[in-house]
Image (tube, rainbow, N blue to C red):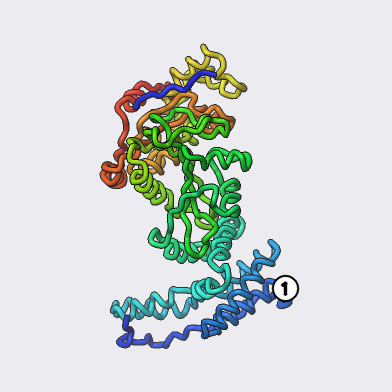
C-alpha cells in the first residue's frame, strides 16, 4: 500500500396589575380532547399533576422517582401520547401572556418585565425541574430531549419541549460543572462499554482493540457530570508519537508496538465522540481538548506538538455533488474520469492511478477546506470545529486513512490541525470575529492551484 504523504505543513412589589388580573394555574388543566384516562400515558400525566402540586422536597423526590419509573416503562406509542399531552396541557396561558405583555408595553418597568418573564415560563419547565429531583432524573431528561429531536419531523409541536429542555440542560451542563477524567484499565466496565458503543470516528472492534487504545503511548479522556458519574458526555482518543502522524491506521491498529511515552514528542488527537444524543448541539469538545492539552503538557513536558489527525467528512460528498456544479459549473472531463476510480476497491494500490488522483484531489481538498463555505465558516464540520477552537490547519495527508470509512467520507485524505497553546485565543478570536482561518502557506498555495470546475 502506498505510504501517506504530508502536504504543507427581584422584587416585583411595585408591579401594577393589568386591568384583568392574570391568574397562573396551580397545575395544568386537563386536555379538552378525548383521552383514555386508563392508558399508561394518562397515568403518568396524573403523576405529573401530583408532582407539580407537591410542595415538600422529600415527598416531591419520591413522586418524581415514581413518575420517572412510569416514563421509562412507556412503550413508544405511549411516549408519543405523553409528549403530545405535555404540549397540550403544560403550556403557558395565552391570556396571561397577553395581559402581561400589554402591561409591560404600557409601562416597561422592571417589575412588569419580571412578571412577563414569569408568564412566559411554562408549567412544563417547573415540571422538568421537579422531575430532576427523582433518581436518575437528569439522565431521563436528556433521553426526553433525544426523543424530541428524533420525533420533530413528524411531531413539530414537540419543538417547544425540546427548546425548554435544551435551555435547562445547557444551564446544568455548563463547563463549570464538568470534570475531565483520564480513562484507563481501572475505569469501571460500564464506562469502557460506553466508549465502545459511542466511538464515532474509528470503530472500536472489541475489548482488545479498546485496551490497546489505553496503553502507555495512548490516552483517552472524557468529560463527566456529577449527576452522571459513570456515563461520559464526550471523550477523545489520542496517540503519543514522534512527530506529527499523517496516517491513522497505525494509531488505531491493536497490533502496533507500544512506544516509550517519555520519548514521544507529539500528542495526536485522532478521535472525538459525543455520548449523549440528548445533548446534541452543546459545545463540549473545545473544553475537552483544551483541558487535555493543559493536563498532558504539564505531565509530559517533552511534548512539543499537540495536533489532530482528522477526517474530512464533507469532501467526498462535495465531490459527488459536482464540486460546485450548483453554481452553474461542471467538473472537467479529466477529473470526472478520475473520480470514477474512487468507487473501485483498493484503487490506491495502482501507483499510476493513485498519483494522478493525488495530483488533482489534494489541491481540491485544500480548496474545499478553505474556500467552500457553510455560512461564514468552512463547509466541512470537522474543520469548523477545530478552527473555531483556535487550531491551525497545518497539513493535508494523501491516503491518511485507507479504511472503508475513510475512503467513503474523505477519499482517504486526512488533515492535521495544530493546537499551539500560545495561539489558541488569538486564532479563535480572529476566526469568530472576522472568519479568518489560520493555515499553513503550502495549503494556501494548493488551494490556488485547484481546478474544481470549468465553464
Q: Which residue extends farthest top?
A: 352
Residue 376 seen by the camera: no
Q: Secondary structure at mark 1?
A: loop
Q: Residue at x 32, y 27 (%)?
A: 444
Q: Residue 400: image x %, image y %?
A: 48, 27
- Horizontally, is 213 left or right of 154 in the view? left
Q: Residue at x 32, y 76 (%)?
A: 105
Q: Is residue 453 above or below residue 145?
A: above
Q: Quadrant of residue 81?
A: bottom right
State the quadrant of the N terminus: top right
- Horizontally, is 201 left or right of 180 in the view? right
Q: Residue 158: image x %, image y %?
A: 56, 63
Q: Dot 1 surroundings within 10 Å: few (below 14), some, or many (20 or more)?
A: few
State the quadrant of the C terminus: top left
Q: Is residue 216 above or below residue 53?
A: above
Say how many tags the image has: 1
Q: Which residue is mark 1?
A: 39
Q: Residue 52: image x %, image y %?
A: 55, 80
Nearest the viewer among 84 and 378 is 378
Residue 12 seen by the camera: yes
Q: Residue at x 33, y 80 (%)?
A: 112
Q: Quadrant of residue 402?
A: top right
Q: Is residue 381 above or below residue 400?
A: below
- Horizontally, is 299 left or right of 186 in the view? left
Q: Residue at x 50, y 75 (%)?
A: 126
Nearest the viewer among 3 and 405 is 3
Q: Residue 336: image x %, image y %?
A: 52, 20
Q: Quadrant of residue 327?
A: top left
Amino acid at each position: 500500500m502506498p505510504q501517506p504523504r504530508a502536504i504543507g505543513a427581584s422584587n416585583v412589589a411595585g408591579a401594577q396589575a393589568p386591568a384583568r388580573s392574570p391568574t397562573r394555574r396551580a397545575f395544568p388543566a386537563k386536555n379538552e380532547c378525548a383521552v383514555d384516562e386508563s392508558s399508561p400515558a394518562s397515568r403518568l400525566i396524573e403523576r405529573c399533576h401530583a408532582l407539580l402540586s407537591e410542595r415538600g422536597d422529600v415527598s416531591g423526590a419520591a413522586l418524581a422517582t415514581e413518575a420517572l419509573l412510569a416514563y421509562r416503562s412507556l412503550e413508544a406509542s405511549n411516549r408519543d401520547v405523553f409528549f403530545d399531552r405535555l404540549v397540550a396541557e403544560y403550556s403557558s396561558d395565552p391570556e396571561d401572556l397577553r395581559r402581561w405583555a400589554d402591561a409591560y408595553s404600557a409601562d416597561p418597568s422592571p417589575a412588569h418585565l419580571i412578571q412577563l418573564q414569569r408568564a412566559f415560563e411554562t408549567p412544563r419547565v417547573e415540571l422538568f425541574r421537579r422531575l430532576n429531583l427523582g433518581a436518575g432524573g437528569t439522565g431521563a431528561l436528556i433521553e426526553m430531549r433525544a426523543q424530541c429531536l428524533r420525533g420533530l419531523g413528524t411531531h413539530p409541536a414537540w419543538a417547544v419541549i425540546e427548546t425548554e429542555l435544551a435551555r435547562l440542560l445547557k444551564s446544568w451542563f455548563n463547563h463549570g460543572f464538568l470534570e475531565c477524567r483520564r480513562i484507563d484499565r481501572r475505569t469501571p466496565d460500564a464506562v469502557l462499554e460506553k466508549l465502545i458503543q459511542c466511538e464515532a470516528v474509528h470503530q472500536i472492534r472489541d475489548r482488545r482493540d479498546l485496551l490497546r487504545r489505553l496503553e502507555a503511548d495512548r490516552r483517552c479522556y472524557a468529560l463527566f457530570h456529577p449527576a452522571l458519574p459513570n456515563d461520559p458526555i464526550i471523550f477523545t482518543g489520542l496517540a503519543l508519537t514522534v512527530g506529527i502522524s499523517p496516517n491513522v491506521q497505525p494509531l488505531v491498529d491493536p497490533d502496533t508496538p507500544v512506544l516509550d511515552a517519555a520519548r514521544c514528542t507529539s500528542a495526536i488527537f485522532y478521535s472525538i465522540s459525543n455520548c449523549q444524543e440528548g445533548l446534541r448541539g452543546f459545545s463540549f469538545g473545545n473544553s475537552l481538548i483544551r483541558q487535555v492539552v493543559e493536563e498532558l503538557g504539564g505531565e509530559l513536558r517533552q511534548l512539543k506538538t499537540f495536533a489532530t489527525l482528522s477526517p474530512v467528512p464533507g469532501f467526498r460528498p462535495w465531490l459527488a455533488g459536482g464540486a460546485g456544479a450548483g453554481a452553474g459549473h461542471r467538473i472537467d472531463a479529466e477529473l470526472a474520469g478520475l473520480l470514477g476510480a474512487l468507487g473501485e476497491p483498493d484503487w490506491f494500490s495502482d501507483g499510476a492511478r493513485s498519483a494522478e488522483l493525488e495530483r488533482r484531489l489534494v489541491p481540491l481538498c485544500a480548496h474545499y477546506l478553505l474556500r467552500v463555505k457553510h455560512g461564514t465558516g468552512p463547509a466541512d464540520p470537522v474543520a469548523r470545529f477545530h478552527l473555531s477552537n483556535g487550531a491551525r490547519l497545518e497539513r493535508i495527508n494523501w491516503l491518511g486513512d485507507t479504511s472503508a470509512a475513510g475512503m467513503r467520507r474523505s477519499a482517504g485524505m486526512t488533515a492535521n490541525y495544530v493546537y499551539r497553546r500560545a495561539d489558541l485565543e488569538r486564532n479563535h478570536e480572529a476566526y469568530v470575529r472576522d472568519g479568518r482561518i489560520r493555515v499553513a502557506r503550502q495549503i494556501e498555495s494548493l488551494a490556488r492551484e485547484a481546478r474544481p470546475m470549468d465553464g
